[in-house]
């Protein structure tokens, strides 16, 4: 099928290429810039008044009209924030190429030009590109990104309408667009698709890439046939600096200190950018780099189990106290080379490299209240359990078990990409070709998880649930309290030594051909092309579970600052690591658990996509219609292992014995799986200019999202109790019909007020599930966690956006700029059992409000970002009425502030405050009688940056 599809794609390219071309006609081209000529204006709309044909400028400010008959024409140029400009131009002959550069705005120094710099310049640039686009997009320019304390790409993107992010350790990581799961969102850098370093996801963790190396971020919410069709939510396009965008040398340096109040530590951040062109403007060179290192932490409480609801006082089954100490280092760099070889031929090579690492120490105490008996000493909001020796004959309760462990993990995530290509434009023909390679990796070298355990066989132990979202330890008896905090009572349990590495790489080739022509008497174009994407993802886990006799916590004792409760004593990570690597031969390998866990997690998968498309654009007076069809053929091939201990499961004849110890055995067999399928993805986007200030858009497009490669991998792990986890190679891809309608008003050509609605009809939504008494890939499970398709899901939303400079106010007040966006989303999915839920990860309400002030040397910015609660995990437990209740992530409001002062035209001092309201992360299960019950609660504190920047 892939060969036939490629043949069809090639045939469509050839057909368009050899079709009767329009009669030879002239070309009008040029550049739109500010009055100084130093700054190119992207998104300016250039229209030929006599024909109605329009073109928008690219990032270099360039526009181009092909197929223009000889004659005299009037070009009308519009750009948000500037008065329209009319220019007369003459095409002397049928084969003439006429260059007409156009300048807009006031004739002032660039540093004082609100058209192109500062908050207003960022607003003008973003709105111009959005207004000119044939698709629904939101643009954030480099100036806009730099106005607030955003550490990375995800945090910068959350300021856009319809965008929500999911945090990790208080920092933005994954992007959600219009309520869709982050796995429904794709990410590209300079047009190159990025793979994911995560072993089990498609979603790209955008905290890997520093925001200081960006030129712009474009959030694309509706698709056309010339882009990849595997995105239900949308695409995040990251653009880096180009030397051909600059008319003069551009140089920027930035240095900052970082303070985090949670750990009372300082860090640092540095970045730099350079861009210039050489060889009479034909060679553009641009380089950016950013590095930061900071220390931060968090304090956490969570229930790793169910809430016990059938006693006089409710209480968590297992209350965990966690303290995180993290040192994060991030380095990002980009290099772009662009060479205008001839007037018609552009050659380019673009590269990105980003390395992100965390050294994390997690101290944890697990309090297992679910094992002992509930005690009559409980009263009010105090739940008390009584510990015993577990003698069933004597009717004694089970011991009260407490684990104190340390996770000592260094995690490194690496992403890099490189693309090379050529763009050729002559007369009515534009042709481009490119090849790219992208790579992502996540490694955990020599990770150590070590635990110590105490089993108390007497005494009363309690938990205060007066605040069910933040329960706390209580000790009704002094002797039990003393025993609990005595490190000598905690004996060594086991240590896990992990070396895991996930790799994800993609090689891609594409070609596109466009011919501008009169289509049935009106200007337009026909475009066709093809693309090949060859992807390989794998995970290799090397795990050793080791034991050691006669070690106690007092030999490795440490302490941490922890304000949520009493967590000390904890395991010192430095002391234990030194001891472990100094005495490796004294630890005994747990052969069975090691073989089972290591083998069952490994997999590799190849996913090859062969695509072709054809599309056309035509003007219908004030309306522009872009319509076409994309075809994607997917070939999926994966391998994994079935690893199990014999017991409830029969041993397949082809399974091999891989581990044996003291009568226990582990068997494994290699398993392969493959799938192939073809998707036809039509789309149509209509843009209608109601007036010069009002734009109406209407669109439909069909998209897919393929299963996560790990979820579809044929990997199975089952223990001797017939419980475990399994991938599902029979998963179908998720499919969606997407509809968009919006109305945008640009009053005075300097602000925007827009409203839009969208609807997504999704089939075969993939969700995780826990099933009982089921056979998966020939293996019987009493209980298995796996993945399934659910038949129906839908998502409806409303999106509002308002941005305006208040320059009509008197005096000093005219420096204010305000902005707000709001997205309402309502989703519904039907599970196999008929239960209706919202789509996991989807918040009903997402909103951002921004107030800016820019006057003279002063630049101030205040932002508040809010998201509603969302469904996170299904059927975590049953409530007191026996009804399944789910894990919900609570709502979140974050406030950020920045202030800048320009000392000279080149130097500026700044300070920024992030999460000034110290908003925690909270997740809960909701009981009808008791409200929110803790699943997770975590505090990160606030942080501040202060520094200086230099621009030339």
Image (cartoon, grey):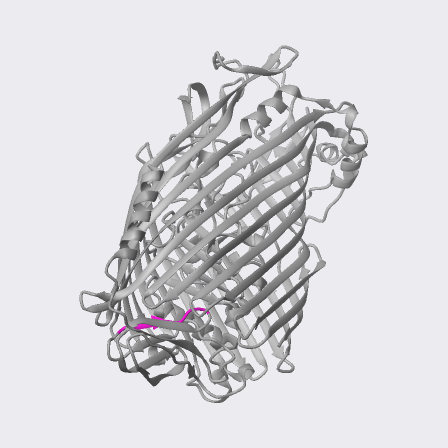
Q: Quadrant of the C terminus?
A: bottom right
Q: Quadrant of the N terminus?
A: top left
Instruction: Say which of 593 and 101 sits in front.
Output: 101
Q: Residue at x 61, y 22 (%)?
A: 595
Instruction: Say which of 402 and 78 sits in front.
Output: 78
Instruction: Say which of 648 and 642 sits in front.
Output: 642
Q: Is residue 679 left or right of residue 821?
A: left
Report the magenta residues as a range.
53-59
Q: Position of residue 566 (x, y in %)?
A: 69, 43
Q: What is the total number of numbered labels drawn onto the structure image?
A: 0
Q: Is residue 604 magenta?
A: no
In this view, the residue farthest toward the left is 520
Above-or-below relation of 462 to 667 = below
Which of the 4 quarters of the picture holds residue 951?
Answer: bottom right
Above-or-below relation of 197 to 283 = above
Q: Position of residue 807 (x, y in %)?
A: 44, 83
Q: Residue at x 31, y 42 (%)?
A: 679
Q: Position of residue 237 (x, y in %)?
A: 46, 58
């Amino acid at each position: 099928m892939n060969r036939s599809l490629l043949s069809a794609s090639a045939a469509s390219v050839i057909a368009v290429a050899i079709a009767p071309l329009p009669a030879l006609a002239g070309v009008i081209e040029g550049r739109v810039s500010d009055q100084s000529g130093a700054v190119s204006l992207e998104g300016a709309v250039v229209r030929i008044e006599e024909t109605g044909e329009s073109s928008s400028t690219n990032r270099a400010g360039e526009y181009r009209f092909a197929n223009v008959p000889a004659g005299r024409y009037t070009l009308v140029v519009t750009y948000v924030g500037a008065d329209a400009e009319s220019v007369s131009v003459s095409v002397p002959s049928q084969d003439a190429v006429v260059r007409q550069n156009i300048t807009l705005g006031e004739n002032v120094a660039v540093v004082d030009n609100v058209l192109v710099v500062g908050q207003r310049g960022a607003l003008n640039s973003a709105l111009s590109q959005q207004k000119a686009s044939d698709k629904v997009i939101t643009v954030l320019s480099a100036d806009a990104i730099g106005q607030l304390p955003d550490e990375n790409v995800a945090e910068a993107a959350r300021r856009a309408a319809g965008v929500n992010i999911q945090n990790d350790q208080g920092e933005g990581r994954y992007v959600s667009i219009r309520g869709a799961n982050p796995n429904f969102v794709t990410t590209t850098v300079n047009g190159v698709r990025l793979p994911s370093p995560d072993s089990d996801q498609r979603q790209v963790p955008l905290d890997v890439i520093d925001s200081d190396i960006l030129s712009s971020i474009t959030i694309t919410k509706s698709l056309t046939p010339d882009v990849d069709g595997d995105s239900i939510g949308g695409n995040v396009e990251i653009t880096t600096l180009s030397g051909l965008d600059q008319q003069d040398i551009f140089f920027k340096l930035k240095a900052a200190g970082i303070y985090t109040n949670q750990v009372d530590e300082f860090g640092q951040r540095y970045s730099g950018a350079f861009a210039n062109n050489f060889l009479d403007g034909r060679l553009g060179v641009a380089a950016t780099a950013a590095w930061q290192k900071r220390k931060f932490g968090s304090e956490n409480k969570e229930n790793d189990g169910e809430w016990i609801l059938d006693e006089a006082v409710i209480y968590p089954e297992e209350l965990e106290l966690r303290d995180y100490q993290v040192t994060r280092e991030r380095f990002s760099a980009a290099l772009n080379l662009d060479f205008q070889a001839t007037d018609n031929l552009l050659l380019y090579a673009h590269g990105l490299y980003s390395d992100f690492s965390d050294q994390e120490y997690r101290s944890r105490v697990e309090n297992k209240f679910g094992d002992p008996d509930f005690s009559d000493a409980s009263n009010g909001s105090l739940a008390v359990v009584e510990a015993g020796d577990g003698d069933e004959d004597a009717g004694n309760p089970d011991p009260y078990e407490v684990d104190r462990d340390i996770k000592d993990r260094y995690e490194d995530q690496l992403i890099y990409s490189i693309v090379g290509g050529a763009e050729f434009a002559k007369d009515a023909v534009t042709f481009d070709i490119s090849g790219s390679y992208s790579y992502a990796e996540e490694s955990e070298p020599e990770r150590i998880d070590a635990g110590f355990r105490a089993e108390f066989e007497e005494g009363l132990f309690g938990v205060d649930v007066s605040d069910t979202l933040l329960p706390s330890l209580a000790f009704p008896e002094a002797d039990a309290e003393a025993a609990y905090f005595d490190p000598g009572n905690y004996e060594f349990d086991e240590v896990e030594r992990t070396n895991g590495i996930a790799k994800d790489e993609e090689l891609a080739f594409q070609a596109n051909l466009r011919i501008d022509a009169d289509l049935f008497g009106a200007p337009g174009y026909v475009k066709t092309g093809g693309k090949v994407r060859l992807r390989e993802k794998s995970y290799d886990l090397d795990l050793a579970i080791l034991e050691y006799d006669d070690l106690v916590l007092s030999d490795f004792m440490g302490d941490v600052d922890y304000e949520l409760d009493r967590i000390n004593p904890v395991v010192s990570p430095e002391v234990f690591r030194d001891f472990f690597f100094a005495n490796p031969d004294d630890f005994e390998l747990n052969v069975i658990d090691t073989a089972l866990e290591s083998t069952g997690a490994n997999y590799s998968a190849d996913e090859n996509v062969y695509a072709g498309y054809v599309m056309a654009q035509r003007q219908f007076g004030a309306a522009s219609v872009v319509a076409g069809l994309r075809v994607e053929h997917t070939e999926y091939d994966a391998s994994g292992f079935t690893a199990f201990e014999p017991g409830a499961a029969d041993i397949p004849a082809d399974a091999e014995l891989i581990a044996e110890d003291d009568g226990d055995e582990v068997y494994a067999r290699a398993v392969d799986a493959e799938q192939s399928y073809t998707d036809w993805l039509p789309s149509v986007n209509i843009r209608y200019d109601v007036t010069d200030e009002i734009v109406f858009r209407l669109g439909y497009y069909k998209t897919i999202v393929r299963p996560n490669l790990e979820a579809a991998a044929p990997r199975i792990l089952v223990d001797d109790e017939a419980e475990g986890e399994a991938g599902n190679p029979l998963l179908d891809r998720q499919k969606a019909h997407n509809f968009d309608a919006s109305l945008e008003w640009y009053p005075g050509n300097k602000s925007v007020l827009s409203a839009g609605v969208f609807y997504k009809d999704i089939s075969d939504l993939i969700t995780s599930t826990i099933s009982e008494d089921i056979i998966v890939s020939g293996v019987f499970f009493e209980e298995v966690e796996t993945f399934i398709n659910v038949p129906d899901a839908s998502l409806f939303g409303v999106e509002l956006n308002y941005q305006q400079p208040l320059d009509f106010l008197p005096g000093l007040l005219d420096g204010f700029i305000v902005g707000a966006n709001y997205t309402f989303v309502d989703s519904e999915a039907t599970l196999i059992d008929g239960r209706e839920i919202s789509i996991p990860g989807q918040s009903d309400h997402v909103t951002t409000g921004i107030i800016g002030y820019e006057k003279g040397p002063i630049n101030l910015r205040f932002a508040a970002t809010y998201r509603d609660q969302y469904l996170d995990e299904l059927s975590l437990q049953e409530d007191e009425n026996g009804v399944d209740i789910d894990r919900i992530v609570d709502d979140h409001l974050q406030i950020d502030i920045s202030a800048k002062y320009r000392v000279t035209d080149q130097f500026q001092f700044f300070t920024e405050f992030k999460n000034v309201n110290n908003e925690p992360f909270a997740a809960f299960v909701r009981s009808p009688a008791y409200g929110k019950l803790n699943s997770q609660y975590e505090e990160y504190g606030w942080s501040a940056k202060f520094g200086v920047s230099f621009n030339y």
